[in-house]
Image (cartoon, grey):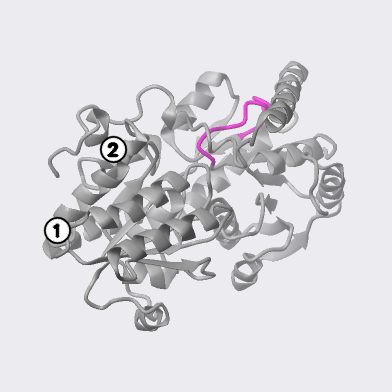
Amino acid sequence: MRVLVYPHDLGIGGSQLNAIELAAAVQRLGHEVIVYGRPGALNARIDELGLEFIPSPEPHRRPTPSIVKSLVRLARERRLDILHGYEWPPALESLLASRRSPGTAAVATVMSMSVAPFIPKSMPLLVGTREILAAEQKFGRSLTGLLEPPVDLDANNPSRNTDSQTFRESWGLDPDAYTVVLVSRLAKELKLEGILAAMDCVELLPAGLRVQLVIAGDGPARQQVEARARTVNAASGRRAIVLTGELSDPRPAYAVADVALGMGGSALRALAFAKPLIVQGEQGFWELLTPDTLPLFLDQGWYGVGSGTHDGAARLAHVLRGLLPDGSRRKTLGSFGLSTVQERFSLERAALAVEDFYSQAAATAGDASIGQDARAFARFAEYQLTTRLRRVLGPAPADDFNSRPVAGAGRRVRPGSATAHGSPSAEP
């Protein structure tokens, strides 16, 4: 097959890194794969993996007509079988181009926490959690599949020489402190609440439990994160919070961790380094990965929603107090996490699933329903109008389909968990 993979951007981020690494894995299966989009920081990774890159026109109002025209031209010139768009703008642009390119099918992957309802139901769709998959099947989509965030286990594993000592020295890490690491985009939606709670948590830990929190990432909430870090460091009388900014290669950060915090693909990459993981969510959600909690994350993804934002720092502090001093337990949980990611989330396994999904999508190319397309267009028009009204009335979320996750609808924590009752439970 000839495939074009179109990430929503090429800045550092989980969805786009997944897109690129999966593209390379599909190419290794014997297919011809192109990566398409606006150049960014991840172009270095594209080159490293030996993928062809074609720049797109500059996106503006989405879907962007010039991008659709460019995709149509490429589909015809390169005789592409699949246009694979990640997140809703590339998905719609790929779909519109496929409508004008006989023999070319469009596929969407959405790694956000919910799916834009204006992606037509007839468009083949891959999502990142079982819970979202069930919601989209109930919505009536024709072809849906599960694509949990994959991990390149060759590039991310505890046996690689990641030069941890140089990383420690570069960032002046305290050799006598436990190192807790959070690799995350500093986004206001989905991420910021947990990042601030993690910093506040450091002040709640006993003086004898010396902890440094390393936060690796950048984004629109940077100023708020920096301000809170200064406050916590001043109150602690030491450099308890270390902000590295965006790292082109975050592997040394994972490697130095005694405990990792995170959600989504970042959480899974931490597991690949055999680190015990506390999964970050919203509204006070923090949950340690154990054999007992694994089914929760396999269902709703590496994320959760708790009972309220006020207890997040206390909940995390409670988990860390029991976990950090227990080196044997940390090693056991790290080994469990590594075996989990090896068995369920390898890049090779995901590539085979994507290859099969491409075959299914190609077989259904041309099955579009005019009625479904019309209803999707009406939902898109409603979305645009609502977004404009929200911008007039006040600030709108920058990442709106991460701001209203499927995992936040109704119950979002397992019965009997700490977050379900709003107070810490006994550690498993």
Q: Are marks 1 and 2 in contact (CB under 8 Å)?
A: no
**Residue 295 bears which disc, if any?**
2
Mark 1 Cα-neighbour bin, 10 Å: few <14, some 14–19, many ≥20: some
Give above or below for 287 relative to 143: below
Mark 2 Cα-neighbour bin, 10 Å: few <14, some 14–19, many ≥20: few
Mark 1: amino acid: Arg
| Residue at (35, 65) in percent of width and height | 234
Q: Is residue 254 magenta?
A: no
| Residue at (23, 50) in percent of width and height | 317
Residue 418 x %, y %: 22, 35
Which residue position holds label 1? 329
1 or 2: tag closer to the N-terminus:
2
Region of the chain picked out in magenta, as a range: 112-124
Q: Is residue 117 magenta?
A: yes
Spatial distance from mark 1 to mark 2, Cα to Cα? 20 Å
Residue 52 in sight from this viewpoint: yes
Q: Nearer the viewer, residue 209 or 38?
A: 209
Residue 339 in sight from this viewpoint: no
Q: Looking at the image, which residue sits at the far top?
A: 371
Give above or below for 84 relative to 244: above
Mark 2: amino acid: Pro
Q: Nearer the viewer, residue 34 or 233?
A: 233
Residue 371 x %, y %: 75, 16
For the C terminus, give its image quadrant.
top left
Horizontal arrangement in the rendering, residue 370 relative to residue 396 (left or right):
right
Q: Main secondary structure of the magenta part?
A: loop
Residue 27 x %, y %: 61, 60
Q: Nearer the viewer, mark 1 or mark 2?
A: 1
Residue 103 x %, y %: 78, 39
Horizontal arrangement in the rendering, residue 294 relative to residue 73 (left or right):
left
